Image (cartoon, coloured by chain):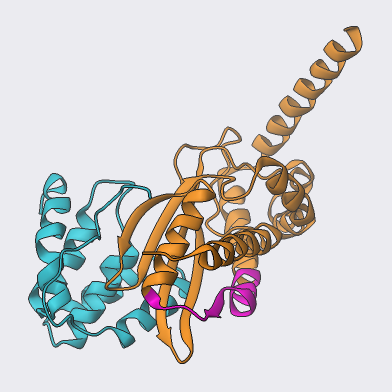
Amino acid sequence: MRRGDANAAAQMLAPLAAAGAARAQALLGRAQEARPSGQQNDFEAYVWYGIAARNGQAGAQSQRERVGAKLQPAEIRQADQIIERWKPRAEPAPSTSNDRTAP
Amino acid sequence: MKLAAATTLRTLCSASMLLLLAACASDAQKISAINAVNQGFRVEYEKLLAEKGTRLFKASRGDAFVAMRVALAELGMHTEQQDMTLGHLAVAAAAPLPLTDEEWRSASQVDLPLLQRLIEPHVGVAASFVQFEPQGLDVVINAAFLDAPGGTEVSLTVRLRERAPPRSGWPRREYVSPRVLTLGLEKIFATFERELKAGPQR
């Protein structure tokens, strides 16, 4: 995935991932990692890989562990709690994950 | 006027001396010193987060999310990532935000002896001349919002991210110092609570 495409990819994948599609969740993890430097979010990449792994996506667990090596133990605990309690949305909804506008 | 000039000159000389002495340590010594700092600060960081990093609020997850986003923006932090479905918000700003310069300075002074104690075994006397350098660092905060009985559990984690290399040439640390963390958490949660009370959020 090219870095310039990562934001657009994340926007496209977010509703599918939120609805529970494991493949989209793993790809969203990858898109979060591929975002331009300074906007990269290893935390959300870890969360989406974790959710994808929980949903049985092949390879997601190893990606989760790889990204997890870049996080603090406290961040991993925080992210693991999000993964544990995550539930798919009943219907795909527009994502806010790349909205950089301040309120 | 002469007095001011002399003071400025003295300050510049002292700063140059500090940089010179700090530069005396070898790269290997500096790296092992920063590893020791990260390790030492991490122990304190984990302890403080366990005590003060997570709080339960009587509010819905959506309201808590929006209130925290507004509170952090009020403190000068800009949103890097937000996902209400996940219950995750990532914000960042140039250090010392969310603290003011004065808050950072006074908190850093409290933490300075710990910093110097941690690096002294690695760099010897140069440890006495090392100072905190917020310049070129971003403070990155992750906030998580989880449904909990009676409300929403809000947890915060904090890390430092390098934007520009430091003037001293020392490697960067990743963990914030204990007093800075304590003050930061208190300030964020206080602003958040004010914002939550001021609701409605949506």
Position of the N terminus of chain B, as image quadrant, is top right
Q: Residue at x 43, y 76 (%)?
A: A78
Task: Please identify the residue farthest to the top as the structure is shown.
Answer: B2
Q: Residue at x 69, y 38 (%)?
A: B22
Q: Which chain, by letter, is orange?
A: B
- Provide residue B91's location: percent of width, then percent of height: 42, 55
> Does B25 lie within the magenta span?
no
Camera-side residue of A72 and B49:
B49
Task: Please identify the residue farthest to the bottom as the structure is shown.
Answer: B149
Camera-side residue of A96 and B173:
A96
Camera-side residue of B107 and B34:
B107
> Is residue B42 visible in this depiction of the protein?
yes
What tint does the image give chain A? cyan
Position of the C terminus of chain B, as image quadrant, is bottom left
> Is residue B160 visible in this depiction of the protein?
no
Q: Relative to B196, does residue B124 appear above or below in the rendering?
A: above
The residue stretch that appears in magenta: B44-61
Q: Relative to A72, does residue A87 appear above or below in the rendering?
A: below
Q: Quadrant of residue A92?
A: bottom left
Q: Residue at x 70, y 49 (%)?
A: B123
- Provide residue B124's location: percent of width, then percent of height: 76, 50
Q: Residue at x 75, y 59 (%)?
A: B114
Task: Please identify the residue farthest to the right as the structure is shown.
Answer: B3
* Left or right of B166 in this view: B69: left
> Does B53 lie within the magenta span?
yes
* Left or right of A99 in this view: A59: left
* Left or right of B60 in this view: B98: right
- Provide residue B112's location: percent of width, then percent of height: 76, 52
Number of callouts in the render?
A: 0
Q: Relative to B11, does residue A95 appear above or below in the rendering?
A: below
- Provide residue B9's location: percent of width, then percent of height: 80, 16
